């Protein structure tokens, strides 16, 4: 699991650990979130590793894969969650920002998936975390929506290529999810954003990290044994 110290990634890591999985996850920037994640994981069954690694760096990915390879239980699932995004008007979008977004999202998914593929066997699962903005669009996010759209095509093709080996590949595309990023805003602004984004959905609320985590756990379980090549929107119907 990449990008597991905050937000959606953290929710998936903790849900998997509480369900009895041995989890290997990574983070790029040290901080309190990493320390608290390690504390929470220590209270769950199993053996877990929280490593500093950049999923967009091939050398770091090698270290991450080596940790999975050394795990006694082997590797049953890969969840590609790590990603980068800095809003930028298209007219100001330079080659560096474009390349960084491509590397931090799409290329990172490719590096991790390709490196861990030899560790996967029949019944294994790869889950890529996409975004519903790839299908509804977002001003200031042309570069981000482009790579998330490409991720869907990558998922579909990988599902066809790896299907004969019994390996399933799917995308989960979250809508607006309430994470700690909202809590870090001034209270009035946080409440305004919650109300605004909740009003866009059929269910009248923001999603939670548990909403995403439960979907990912379903996809990596035997219950989803005939589900592959899919892009599952978890967005409350925006």
Image (spheres, grey):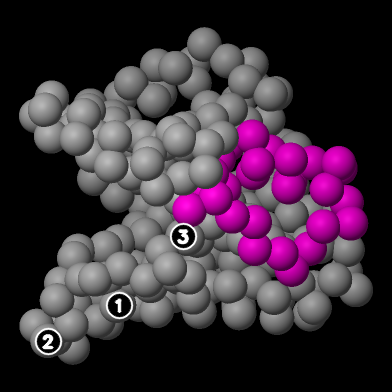
The residue pinned by badge 1 equals 143
Do labels 3 and 2 touch, CB within 8 Å? no
Residue at the spot 54% in from the left edge and 30% down from the top edge: 210
Q: How many marks?
A: 3
Q: Please tell me whether residue 214 belongs to the stretch shown in magenta.
A: yes
Q: Nearer the viewer, mark 1 or mark 2?
A: 2
- Which percent across, then down, holds residue 142? 29, 77
Q: Quarter-wise, where is residue 193 in the image?
A: top left
Q: CA distance from mark 1 to mark 3?
A: 13 Å
Precedes in sequence: disc 1 or disc 3: 3
Precedes in sequence: disc 3 or disc 2: 2
- Measured along the vertical axis of the image, is residue 32 above or below residue 113? above
- Measured along the vertical axis of the image, is residue 157 above or below residue 23? below
The residue pinned by badge 3 equals 131
**Element type at mark 3:** loop
Do labels 1 and 3 touch, CB within 8 Å? no
Pick the front one: 87 or 84: 87
Q: Which residues are magenta?
A: 212-238
The residue pinned by badge 2 equals 91
Do labels 1 and 2 touch, CB within 8 Å? no
Q: Is residue 140 visible?
A: yes
Residue at the spot 74% in from the left edge and 46% down from the top edge: 220
**Element type at mark 1:** helix
Residue at the spot 40% in from the left edge and 48% down from the top edge: 200
Q: CA distance from mark 3 to mark 2?
A: 23 Å
């Amino acid at each position: 699991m990449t990008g597991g110290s905050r937000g959606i990634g953290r929710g998936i890591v903790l849900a998997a650990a509480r369900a009895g999985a041995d989890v290997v996850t990574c983070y790029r920037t040290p901080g309190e979130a990493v320390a608290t994640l390690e504390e929470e994981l220590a209270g769950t069954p199993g053996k877990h590793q929280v490593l500093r690694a950049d999923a967009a760096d091939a050398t770091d990915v090698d270290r991450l894969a080596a940790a999975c390879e050394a795990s006694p239980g082997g590797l049953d699932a890969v969840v590609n969650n790590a990603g980068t995004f800095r809003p930028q008007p298209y007219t100001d979008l330079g080659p560096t920002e474009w390349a960084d977004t491509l590397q931090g999202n799409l290329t990172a998914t490719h590096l991790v998936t390709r490196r861990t593929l030899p560790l996967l066997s029949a019944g294994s699962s790869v889950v890529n975390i996409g975004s519903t903005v790839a299908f509804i669009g977002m001003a200031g996010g042309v570069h981000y929506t482009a790579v998330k759209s490409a991720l869907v095509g990558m998922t579909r093709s990988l599902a066809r290529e790896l299907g004969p080996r019994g390996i399933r590949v799917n995308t989960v595309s979250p809508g607006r999810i309430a994470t700690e990023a909202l809590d870090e805003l001034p209270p009035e602004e946080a409440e305004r954003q919650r109300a605004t984004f909740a009003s866009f959905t059929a269910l009248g609320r923001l999603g939670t990290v548990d909403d995403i985590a439960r979907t990912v756990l379903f996809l990596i379980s035997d219950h989803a044994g005939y589900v592959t090549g899919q892009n599952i929107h978890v967005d409350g119907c925006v």
